Amino acid sequence: MEVRKVNVFFPIFIVGYIALSILAGSVMAVLVNMGIPMPDWIQYVISEGIILVIAIIYMAVNRIDPMKDISYKRIGFVDGILSLAAGYCMIPMVLFLNSITMLFSTNYLEEGTTTLLTYPFFMQVILLAVIPPLVEELVFRGIFFGSYRKAGMSGAAIMSGLIFGCFHLNINQGLYAFAIGIVFAYMVEATGSLWSSVIAHFAINTYSIGVVQLLKMTGIYASDGQAVGALEGEGELAASAGALATVMQLIVLLALATAFMMLAVLCIRIMAKRHGRLENIKVRTEGIKGIKKYLSAPVVVGLAICICYMIAIEFAG
């Protein structure tokens, strides 16, 4: 996998995803008008399916064997627990960044997952916490980070995080997805395995499911999903940011985010030490300064498309 090839792939991936998503949505609307029921979960599965299909085509064209060229090395029980812990420790950071963006942006993911969080528990886990980590980690840490890594670690982590954030195509998710995307890259580097980021991604996505289950147990959660928090940390603290995100709340969230991120970093360092890869995860300023070597014309075009789309939906909303 080469940087040049993956740079060209990025705008194609974005345009293909948007176009196919619009096409799928139009087809579903026609079917609904014909009286054919289309449960919300179908659209969610189709969305992840589009990502996977585009990725498979890219790997086929470039003769990439996901089991050989992408690191799916098995990780042990201890690494699994540390990855899970690191994922949960990132949630306060996600909540803080989400609270910031909710001050001026719409929470589109909460709107899109409200119905999904009324489904049976096992369906919630499969749809929100199993499928997305498996598919998205293959693409963003497997293909993108795996390609950029050959040109340097720090720059590769930032670029894969930037692409991951922009791919979400809305400002609200984009900021925290950028941040956790960088951390996920360092987890993969620490263990040499994509499974560590898959597990951490799973942990973050189970947050809202767990909150909803607790609300159901206490009778607070309405059957129509009105009390829902959102996926990947978009919970109650941020869902009504306009009313609740006071300066004091943001300070508290920032303090919690800082403390728990220190624990997440500790988990990552322990994993890196266990695998003799501590040197690999050192942040090098020369790698960060050299980020421009990744920014070829196709990447800039892809980023511009994502930013324009984000701005457009904010004004449209």
Image (spheres, rainbow, N blue to C red):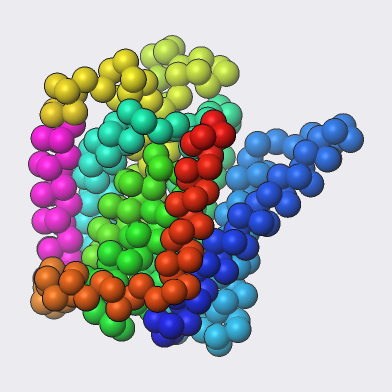
Residue that appears at 70% across and 36% down: 39
Instruction: Report x, y in % for residue 11.
Output: 52, 67
**Placement of the N terminus among the 4 image quadrants:** bottom left
Residue in front for this viewpoint, 77 or 46: 46
Residue in front for this viewpoint, 67 or 176: 176
The extreme top residue here reads 219
Measured along the vertical axis of the image, is residue 2 above or below residue 73?
below
Residue that appears at 76% across and 45% down: 26
Measured along the vertical axis of the image, is residue 306 above or below residue 71?
above
Residue 265 lies in the magenta stretch: yes
Residue that appears at 59% across and 73% down: 56
Residue that appears at 59% across and 61% down: 15
Instruction: Report x, y in % for residue 119.
Output: 58, 31
Circle count: 0
Q: Quadrant of residue 218?
A: top left
- On screen, residue 230 versus residue 242, left or right, reads right
Q: Which residues are magenta?
A: 253-275
Instruction: Report x, y in % for residue 32.
Output: 81, 35
Residue 191 in view in this figure: no
Measured along the vertical axis of the image, is residue 290 above or below residue 317?
below
- On screen, residue 85 versus residue 295, left or right, reads left
Residue 187 in view in this figure: yes
The extreme right residue here reads 34
Q: Quadrant of residue 35?
A: top right
Q: Main secondary structure of the magenta part?
A: helix
Residue in front for this viewpoint, 283 or 92: 283
Residue 31 lies in the magenta stretch: no
Instruction: Report x, y in % for residue 181.
Output: 32, 57
- On screen, residue 256 versus residue 68, left or right, reads left
